[in-house]
Image (cartoon, rainbow, N blue to C red):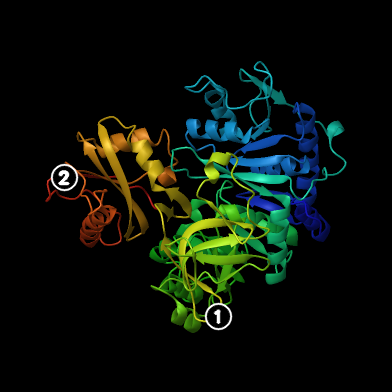
Amino acid sequence: MGLALHERFLRGVDLAPRNDAVRVGTESITYEQAHERALVWAGALLQAVRKPPGTVAVLAAKGIDAYVGILAGLYAGATVVPLQPGFPPARTRRMMRSAQVSAVVADTAGWTQLPELMAPGPDGERPFDLGDPDAPLPVLAPGCPPGAHPGVERIVPATAGALVAPRPVRAADTAYVLFTSGSTGRPKGVPISHGSAAHYFRLQDERYDFSPDDVFSQTFDLNFDCAMFDLFCAWGAGATALWAPPGAYRELPAFAAENRMTVWFSTPSAIPLVRRLGGLAAGALPGLRWSFFAGEALTCQDAADWQTAAPGSVLENLYGPTELTITIAAHRWEEVHSARIAVNGVVPIGHVNAGHDHLLLGADGRPAADEGELCVTGPQMTRGYLDAADDAGRFLEHDERTWYRTGDRVRRIGGSGELAYLGRLDSQVQIAGWRVELPEIDHALRGCEGVTEAVTVDVAGASGTELVVFYTGREVPAAAFARQLREVLPMGMTPRHYWRLDEFPLNSNRKTDRGALRARAAERLGAAVRALPGESAGSTGDTTGDTTGDISTPTT
């Protein structure tokens, strides 16, 4: 197989042309159909873009148009940028501008949002720059109602303009860009090259025995890098990628059986949810062959419970930041062995992928033997962020090579070479697979009416990691916080608990004592959880002179 990411789909076309490449509810599309449609769309995109191949944003929820849109962008030789229509428009506008988007593929939700996205931002700039201030933005919106938006040139794909074959690309060309949370309130764009993706998926092909008979769950949003594992592992094997809607978790055994699902991949947060809903009875998931978890720490108890429900499944804990192309390490679960070498009851993250070197950086900034910040170099490492200013502090020059600093503290396990995850060194946390930098939330909170200062901490709650906000200023109703924050933050980054203080506790260095705030939050959440077992924390009483407010949201 060649180095182009789209060549994995071409292999699927050869292996199983009439298999469903994607299935979303009652809709599906075969490999043959998706291939032909993507060639038509790619031809239309290239004709519309002023400087092809350009950058194609896919502004669409999970649906057939979104998946074919990603494929069409790759066929055109363009850089693909998956965007989520549910994000606040201001955030999406910043992403489009940062990625220098030159065309958009939109579904109905994306098309509806375009007028707001196209409006000039507070700085008067448009979310795209085509070199001509009057040039319209080319948008391919199949399946959307007829009509146009101001500033938009609607692309009409035609069979006559279809490409004969996907355009060739180079290893250094960017295949896709994903955005991660940024501490300044500005998302950071991470470009991943075709060469990095080729190395990654070659390793997956060597490690796993996926085939055209497999059906992969597709639980991740398309702007989450683990979705790329689902799609391109499935497509490289001629298998089917199956959208798993939120309702699937309520009766996961029935959903898996009905759809003959064989490969599951999600964040570990799915395990306690499925367990609470009765889906982890012994042997409840007999059809699974492979089970993967990534995005946050996987506990040994959760792994053991999932394995009991899926006894015929091989379970792996995958680890890796977006900057290292999806995942960079893996540990295969073996109940006795894994539990014995686990640290703090968390499944190890395993060995770093072949072809890479890693080192542990001690607190003194020097390489450490057994414990420290994980730094990795090798073919999966991004060349840097879209904005070079974001590179500061994230890359290390050592041994005449550049290394990516993950910000994760790990420990070597004996002489096995495997690594155990100990936690974050900085203020970045994982919330249901979302990589969240707490200062970004603090930054957004300071823009809320009535807030003087704000500190966000992460606390382990009954349903996983919870975000708790402490703030100074006048009392603000929790609902008002939610309303204001959802204008600038995705739902997954919006905290649920807000408590006002007269002042923040300080440590011996006269800095805000986040440890003390986290302990206070844990105490309060613990009391709420004990009062309402199995439920989200509700409002609690005030016994320390500060005001408490909580927001409960559905968990399914």
Q: Position of residue 433 (x, y in %)?
A: 48, 55
Indicate the secondary structure of the residue bearing disc 2: loop
Q: Is residue 62 visible?
A: no
User: x%, y% of residue 431?
Assistant: 42, 53
Disc 1: CA contacts within 10 A as few (<14), some (14-19) or many (>=20): few
Pick the front one: 171 or 12? 171
- Residue 325: percent from left, percent from top: 62, 55
197 left or right, relative to 283: right
Locate residue 304 relative to residue 98 in the image: left or right.
Answer: left
**Element assignment for label 1:** loop
**What residue is at 69 percent from the left and 24 percent from the top?**
154
Residue shown at 31% from the left, 37% from the top: 481
Relative to residue 416, is residue 108 depicted above or below?
A: above
Residue with the mark numbered 2:
546
Question: Nearer the N terminus, badge 2 or badge 1?
Answer: 1
Q: Quadrant of residue 95?
A: top right
Residue 527 position within the rendered picture, expressed as x and y whole percent measured from the top left = 20, 59
Residue 365 seen in this snapshot? yes
- The CA distance from mark 2 to mark 1 is 49 Å
The residue tagged 1 is: 416
Kind of residue at disc 2: Asp
Q: Depth check: 389 or 535 in front?
A: 389
Task: Give neighbour class at mark 2: few <14, some 14-19, many 20+ (Cα, 10 Å).
Answer: some
Q: Residue furthest bottom?
A: 336
Q: Is residue 240 above or below residue 208?
A: above
Q: Amino acid at mark 1?
A: Ser
